[in-house]
Image (cartoon, rainbow, N blue to C red):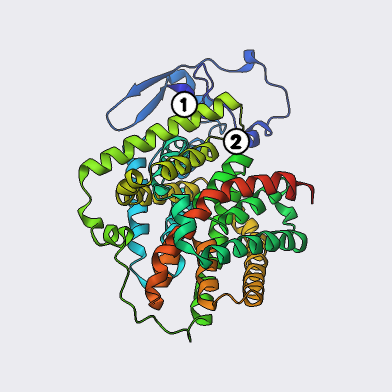
Amino acid sequence: MATSLPFLNSTGIWLLSSRQTRRRSQIVSRKDLPEFSAKAVISSQRLRLWPSRSDERFLSSGYLTDVSSSMRSVSVRSQLSTPLISSNDEWGTWTALFATGAFGIWSEKTKVGSAVSGALVSTLIGLAASNLGIISSDSPAFAIVLNFLLPLAVPLLLFRADLRRVVKSTGKLLLAFLIGSIATTVGTVLAYYLVPMKALGPDSWKIAAALMGRHIGGAVNYVAISNALGVSPSVLAAGLAADNVITAVYFTSLFAIGSKIPAEVLPPPTSDVNKDSETKNKIPVLLIAIGIAVSLAICKAGALITKCLGISGGSLPAITAVVVVLATVFPSQFAHLAPSGEAMALILMQVFFTVIGASGNIWSVINTAPSIFLFALVQIGTHLAVILGVGKLLNIELRLLLLASNANVGGPTTAAGMATAKGWNSLIVPGILAGIFGIAIATFIGIAFGVKVLKFM
């Protein structure tokens, strides 16, 4: 018990502070110290140390005048350094993670949340909670989210990734999307040349590659590339926070550019995608169970492929490849599981964003976010200029270019939202498919371009 108190050594002897020791000019040996004893008496309220009568003269001689104040200061420091929800509090940690994720989903129904996205809301709350001492920044639950729940979410997101249907259904929108992907690549090179983000050290080219994948596919690609290349947690959180601000402004700009494009007079398409969205609140429990089981099996297959081929950087790329192949070979079966899969993936991704925030250091995020913000600004600005310029030369409709750009930067969800809001009903399904196509290819493009090009710039 005595070892838990900073002013006692392992034998229970009172230790002198450095200031008190300096009061004595001579060297004090063990023989010079008076003999005294200390016995611990534990009560239900506190721990008391009772010296013997022979110690009174020594204790009152001025050597230990600061003991009580030392106890108080040590006690305060201990309380401030211990989070409210400790890393060993598993139930408390999981409650905090899922509650924050639920709040992020709910926030998108508000004006502020819809403007900045639920992902950013969950990330910022997680960042604040860990840095204010509410939850631990290194809980074992975080590893479970990163190693199991995140890979589980990838197949759930890609049950609609039937590449044959993408090619048949998107038409010129797919061409516009490919132009946008090239535009993102050009923007990445230019942005990395102008804003090299040297303050990030070895993470600079890695975060550039991750943001490239983010602006071809979506947030899940950003995470997969970051994990594969080994981006540090604080830089990952800073990049996500800075990019979400940029994309929120960018989507507003796309709506402004397309403000004069009229809505269609055609009725909404009666597709499987729309039927699924209309009945999303009536998803059978059986489909949810099957979707999770299939996703787990795909994760197992991806992990085995990664291990057998000796691929470094995690199993997310292999998992992505497996689910895309299966969704293309068995389109009807996987499309039937898509609504339940997307609902589960939404929850898991929000929990992941919370973990990303909670793993970051707020001062590191503040110091690194400005350079990442400037990089993303140049990258997306170049993307918009190139896709609009090349699209005009090829006589592609402006609405197709805007929707393709939205699918590039935001993914299938934001593309569908824009098509619905603008009344471009015939483009809702193609927008979703183009976004899913981006998620299917962006991880491989980002990793390859980062390792082969950005690393040597």
Relative image position of residue 299 (x, y in whole percent): 44, 34
Using the image as rendered, state which of residue 224 and residue 136 is in the foreground.
Answer: 224
- First-in-chain label (2 vs 1): 1
Using the image as rendered, state which of residue 229 and residue 446 is in the foreground.
Answer: 446
Packing grade of label 2 (10 A; few <14, some 14-19, many >=20) is some
Using the image as rendered, state which of residue 192 and residue 13 is in the foreground.
Answer: 192
Taking the spot 26% from the left edge, 39% from the top edge, the residue there is: 289
Corner quadrant of residue 28 = top right
Q: Is residue 447 left or right of residue 92?
A: right
Q: Is residue 92 left or right of residue 174?
A: left
The reply to whether residue 140 is in sight is no
Corner quadrant of residue 20 = top right
Q: Amino acid at mark 2?
A: Gly
Taking the spot 67% from the left edge, 34% from the top edge, the residue there is: 23
Taking the spot 45% from the left edge, 66% from the top edge, the residue there is: 415
Q: Amino acid at mark 1?
A: Ser
What's the CA distance linking mark 2 and mark 1? 42 Å
In the image, residue 418 above or below residue 9:
below
Q: Would you say the residues marked 2 and 1 are in contact, meaning their CB atoms lie under 8 Å apart?
A: no
Query: Which of the two marks, 2 or 1, is nearer to us in this view?
Result: 2
Corner quadrant of residue 295 = top left
Q: Is residue 30 left or right of residue 439?
A: right
Q: Which residue is mark 1?
A: 4
Quadrant of image for the N terminus: top left
Q: Which residue is mark 2?
A: 313
Relative image position of residue 246 (x, y in whole percent): 56, 67
